[in-house]
Amino acid sequence: MKVTVLGSGSSGNAILVESQQARLLVDAGFSGRDLERRLAAVEVAPESIDALLITHDHCDHTRGMGVLARRWGIPLYITETTRSACADLLTGTEDVRPYASDQSVVVGDLLVNPFLTVHDAVDPVAVTVTELPTGDKLGIATDLGRPTATVRHALRHCDLLILESNHDEIMLRESPYPWSVKARIAGSHGHLSNRAAAELATELVHAGLGCVILAHLSESSNDPGLAYDVVAAALDRHHFDGEIQVGVQSRPLASLDVSRLKLARKPVQLGLF
């Protein structure tokens, strides 16, 4: 399974997951034209995408979903409540395939398991994606007001984890946002701080975790280097020796092969004779 963060931040999010049999796009928070540009940058044709799955109704996850679904005939997986909230982005001509937070979705050889999050959207979910032939497991959790028991359980044993690290608490307090916005972001239905992301990441560390990608960074209340340092320091204390990367808003990250990350972390077993 190969994973590419096409872009992640407060202004747009989209993640491409590829296997031997399927291509799945999770969220489409950029314009249709921008999504096509980002896909071209990683040499993926939009018409080759087998499914687009939307996690919640906020525009930084939905902006281009209608255009992409209509222009390229991509099946659109979305919950009924989120679909209603995003009605102005849809014309009714899309191939809409409703799903629910307790309902798995199969796209080729990819198994998508959604789970509820605590976030100020109408029906927010995060997802894990498992490649059935290999068992490779990806966790995508970019909008978490707080890490609930459900979230912790769902994200166990991921081989690659894409985790929100939205803001630095001091930078948020000193930001130009109105106090109401600051309270929303820092609240239990808002976004994870770097410190909270570090705490959750350390709870999810296990021998098979090959990479943590920090995502959904605020452009005004965070700094990529700071987010990296906070999470890396916490993971280092738990002897994590995998990769840590930071998603950016402006461009795709390099694609990651989950199987190779797993193999790189498995110790070589020597024979006795």
Image: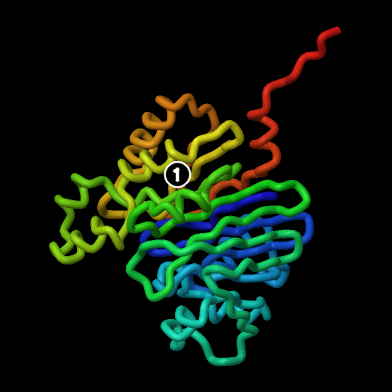
Q: Is residue 3 left or right of residue 226?
A: right
For image coordinates 48% across by 24% down, the residue present is 239
Task: Where is residue 31? Give x, y as percent.
Answer: 49, 73
The residue positioned farthest toward the right in the image shown = 273
Judge from the rendering whether residue 165 lies leftward or rightward of residue 52; answer left or right: left
Residue in the image at 53% along x and 27% along y: 241
Name the colouring of the figure. Answer: rainbow
Q: Position of residue 14 (x, y in %)?
A: 52, 62
Residue denoted by label 1:
246
Along the horizontal axis of the image, is 52 left or right of 151? right
- Front one among 232 and 9: 232
Give the quadrant of residue 67. Answer: bottom right
In percent of the image, x 69 and y 37: which residue is there?
260
Towards the viewer: 37 or 25: 25
Q: Is residue 81 visible?
A: yes
Quarter-of-image position of residue 91: bottom right
66 in relation to 160, above or below:
below
| Residue 81 point in image, percent of width and height | 46, 81
Name the secondary structure under disc 1: strand
For residue 97, above or below residue 145: below
Q: Quadrant of the C terminus?
A: top right
> In the rendered view, would you say 166 is above or below 270?
below
What is the count of numbered marks? 1
Using the rendered view, name the quadrant where residue 132 is placed: bottom right
**Which amino acid type corresponds to the residue marked 1 in the rendered image?**
Val
* 144 to 123, vertically: above or below: above
| Residue 123 horizontal/vertical position (percent) | 43, 73
Can see residue 34?
A: no
Mark 1 closeness class: few <14, some 14–19, many ≥20 residues within 10 Å: many
Q: Residue at x 66, y 70 (%)?
A: 51
